[in-house]
Image (cartoon, rainbow, N blue to C red):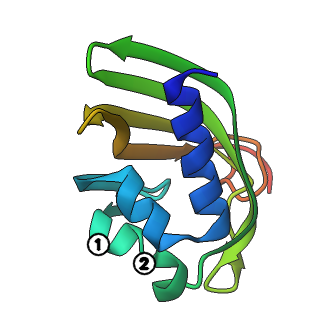
Amino acid sequence: MSEIDTFLSDWSDAERNGDPTALDTLLTDDFLGVGPLGFVLPKSIWVQRFDQFGLDYEAFDLDEVQTRVHGDAAVVTARQTARGTAGGQPVPEAVRATLALVVEGGTWRLAGIHMSFIAGTPGAPPLPGAAE
């Protein structure tokens, strides 16, 4: 398993477990997360969103992972599959996620993530013109 694969596994575990301490270590200080609805969260809010927004994952996994390394940076594109709730409402079952990783202090860290809905998956808005 590569260092990036190990990092992605550790990050997925921290998200699944709602572990703000682990996330604080795994994210860069200037981390920005963009959700599927376009909201932007800095690190300080991202690591606390489990308590702040009632986010609770039963499952959280990455598949269809494609990694491109460019020196001390990497771009990872993946399908994020989750089951859980936020504020009592179900989270989208699947989103496409692009993660920006950088090497800081000799280890990979997450500098940013951008998510978008995958059309046709539960929790995603309907395709334009599609019957509801």
At label 1, counting other C-alpha atoms closer than 10 Å, the crowd grade (few under 14, some 14-19, many 20 or more) is some
Q: Position of residue 42 (x, y in %)?
A: 27, 64
Does 23 appear above or below 77? below
Determine the residue located farthest toward the front in the rendered image.
106
Residue drawn at (76%, 42%) of the image: 120
Q: Amino acid at mark 1?
A: Ser
**Residue 48: mark in rendering:** 2
In this view, 129 is above or below 5: below
Q: Name the element at disc 1.
A: helix
Asked whether the viewer can see residue 96, the reply is: no
Query: Where does the image place residue 121, in percent across and percent down from the top left?
Result: 77, 46
Q: Which mark is residue 20?
A: none
Per the model, the C-alpha gap separating discs 2 and 1 is 7 Å
Residue 30's image quarter? bottom left
Residue at the location (78% across, 54% down)?
A: 122
Residue shown at 59% from the left, 60% from the top = 15
Up/down of 121 relative to 78, above or below: below
Secondary structure beneath dot 2 equals loop
Q: Is residue 102 above or below residue 60?
A: above
Instruction: Characterize the local packing of mark 2: few (<14), some (14-19) or many (20 or more) Cα atoms within 10 angstroms.
Output: some
Q: Is residue 88 left or right of residue 21?
A: right
Residue 48 image position (x, y, % from top left): 42, 78
Query: Which amino acid type is marked by label 2?
Result: Gln
Identify which residue, 5 or 118, lies in the foreground: 5
Q: Label 1, on which residue?
A: 44
Tag 2–tag 1 contact (CB < 8 Å): yes
Which quadrant of the figure contains the N terminus?
A: top right
Depth check, front residue: 39 or 60: 60
Identity of the residue drawn at 60% across and 77% down: 55
Q: Is residue 116 visible?
A: yes
